[in-house]
Amino acid sequence: MKKQILSGIQPSGILTLGNYLGALRNWVKIQDDENYDCKFFVADLHAITVSQDPETLRNNIKSIIMQYLACGLDAEKNTIFIQSHVHEHAELGWLLNNYTYMGELSRMTQFKDKSKKQENVKVGLFDYPVLMAADILLYSADFVPVGQDQKQHIEITRDIAQRFNSLYKKEIFKIPEPFITANTAKIMSLQEPTKKMSKSDENKEATIFLLDSREVITKKIKKAVTDSENVVRYSDDKPGIKNLINIYSAVTDKTVAEIEEEFKDSGYGKFKQAVADAVADLLEPIQAKYAELALPENDEYIKEICKKGAAVAHEIASKKLKEVQEAIGYRTI
Ligand code: TYM
């Protein structure tokens, strides 16, 4: 039996280098391993936990599918779909609400951070980890490849699944595990390197987006906040340089020791230029592929992928939902 892999990204605009190195790049690697059966979706039901303009949301959903493909996800090797096309996500989410405690959800750090930034916090934002649990449990995922910030949501998913299984004395849900790649699990902000790089950072200098031009990438990396030592050394008390070394290492596959050796006689200027060149070289083919996918003649192709993906996902999700409903006491009449 192949191991099941599942992950998703919210459609909140152009992906960041953090999303790519923390998640998407790992998905592209896993898809070629025959031991895994992979499903990747656009988490559009999660996106409305903050206000959304309909036109922007529509464009962002399509754009994420195009970014998945441009980054190398292969629709022949994986199931790619849009969450809202598979109604079982919302349905299982509701059921699982009744096996989840307010106290558990109140402890979620992402909720605490995001709710601070809003005046009228929506119930959906609070409830978001339960929907995420439904996403994962519907497909009996063994592994969920994500960045560090999602680890807590996978832990609560495990708790909900274990609670449900033991209540009904049946292994209805598979207990999933996070799949996190050490050095790229948390790519930091270029402006505040103790904070994660985020799509929604108001300071655009802090974030590299997958569609940034070479010129913009170079400008952002040159302006990245570092210390004044001017020595390329990997250390926790040099978070800015540590982050740039992590990025350079992830992009070039060089080890930290090799990087320190390569730049031992150069200051930050030369190092930053090398990081910027490496990142721009990495993103160039992705951007070319994205531009090609954006041509109107490819609209049908993209729609077909989503339609096919949703059909496959629905087939699996509906069976799991039925099992859950039967365990609870529904579907008897
Ligand atoms: P989202 O859309 O915020 O982020 C998508 C993925 O990118 C990772 N990530 C990062 N990794 C490293 N460094 C960073 N700075 C960085 N920023 C983001 C995230 O960890 C994530 O893997 N709740 C999820 C979407 C979701 C989901 C799911 C994921 C919904 N249902 C089920 C897995 C399984 C989210 O908002 O990710």
Image: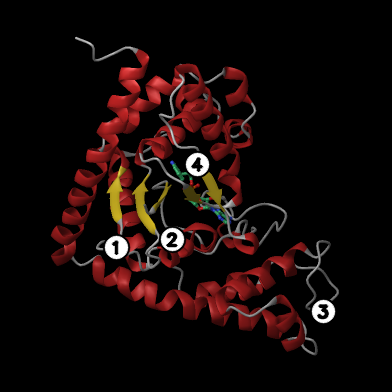
Element class at badge 1: loop
Residue 257 position within the rendered picture, expressed as x and y whole percent measured from the top left: 75, 80
Distance from disc 2 to disc 4, alpha carbons, whole Å, reads: 16 Å
Instruction: Report the side of 198 relative to 52 (left or right).
Output: right
**Is label 2 in contact with label 1 (beta carbons under 8 Å)?**
no
- How dense is the environment of label 3, judged by Cα within 10 Å: few (below 14), some, or many (20 and up)? some
Distance from disc 1 to disc 4, alpha carbons, whole Å, reads: 22 Å
| Residue 176, numbered label | 4
Comes first in the chain, label 1 or label 4: 1
**Is label 3 in contact with label 1 (beta carbons under 8 Å)?**
no
Residue found at x 72% / y 54%: 194
Residue found at x 67% / y 60%: 191
Which residue in the structure is indicated by mark 2?
Answer: 27
Comes first in the chain, label 3 or label 4: 4
Which residue in the structure is indicated by mark 1?
Answer: 77
Element class at badge 4: loop
Comes first in the chain, label 3 or label 1: 1
- Colour scheme of the rendered structure: secondary structure
Residue type at mark 3: give it: Val
For discs 2 and 4, the disc positioned in front in the rendered view: 4
| Residue 231, numbered label | 3
For discs 2 and 1, the disc positioned in front in the rendered view: 1
For discs 3 and 4, the disc positioned in front in the rendered view: 4
Distance from disc 3 to disc 1, alpha carbons, whole Å, reads: 44 Å
Comes first in the chain, label 2 or label 1: 2
Quadrant, the C terminus: top left
